[in-house]
Image (cartoon, rainbow, N blue to C red):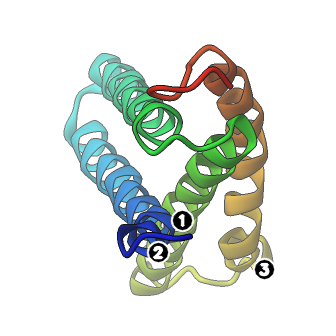
Amino acid sequence: MTTPAEPTRQSGWWTRAFVYGAIYLAIGLVFAALAGHAAAPGRQAWRVAAYIISAIAFGTHIQFERVSAGKSIFGAALHAAFAVAVGACGLAVMANIHAYNAGVLRSRLLRASIILWPLITAIPAFLVGLAAATLMRPRGGTA
């Protein structure tokens, strides 16, 4: 028998995925702007900082899905990878908008980025998520 809270818990992963996707998008935009305004040596530091903060967000997402929500290893990795894909899609859309505003949107590859970037990021995110999720145990469970 299902409890009234169970459907909410099951559908909650969509909300978490879009929130984490928005976090990845914000990290990408903010740190790209900071890197764009920095002197040459500082640009690399801002990019590395963006990767580190994104990795922390990814780790907290995997941990929440696996430990708090009690998802399977596969489910936790899939949900986190979906969030990464959402963030990458948002960054691709923003890159296209930026190129359009700059008057340089002629590249088919840039337009294809809306499909390619989510795939290019979600696949490794899923594999890393699987590895990370195997190290975690759900609360009150052994699997």
The C terminus lies in quadrant = top right
The image position of residue 42, as x and y in percent, is 27, 21
Element at badge 1?
A: helix
Q: Nearer the viewer, mark 2 or mark 3?
A: 2
Q: Between tags 1 and 3, which lies in front?
A: 1
Query: What numbered label is drawn on residue 117?
Result: none
Tell me the element at label 3: helix
Q: Amino acid at mark 1?
A: Val
For label 1, the residue is 86
Q: Disc 2 or disc 1, which is closer to the eye?
A: 2
Disc 2 crowd, CA 10 A, few/some/many (<14, 14-19, 20+): few
* Residue plotted at (70% across, 35% down): 73
- Amino acid carrying label 2: it is Pro
| Coordinates of residue 110 in the picture (x, y in percent) | 68, 71
C-alpha gap between disc 2 and disc 3: 42 Å
Q: CA distance from mark 1 to mark 3?
A: 21 Å
Q: Which residue is mark 3?
A: 108
Q: Amino acid at mark 3?
A: Arg
Residue 60: quarter of image: top left
83 to the left or right of 46: right
Would you place residue 7 above or below residue 122 in this image?
A: below
Dot 2 or dot 3: first in sequence order is 2
Quadrant position of the N terminus in the picture: bottom right
Instruction: Name above or below for residue 122 compared with residue 7.
Output: above
Q: Along the polypeptide, which appears first: circle 2 or circle 1?
A: 2
Q: Is residue 126 above or below residue 39?
A: below
Residue 7 shows which numbered tag? Answer: 2
Packing grade of label 1 (10 A; few <14, some 14-19, many >=20) is: many
Label 2, label 1: how far apart the Cα atoms are: 23 Å
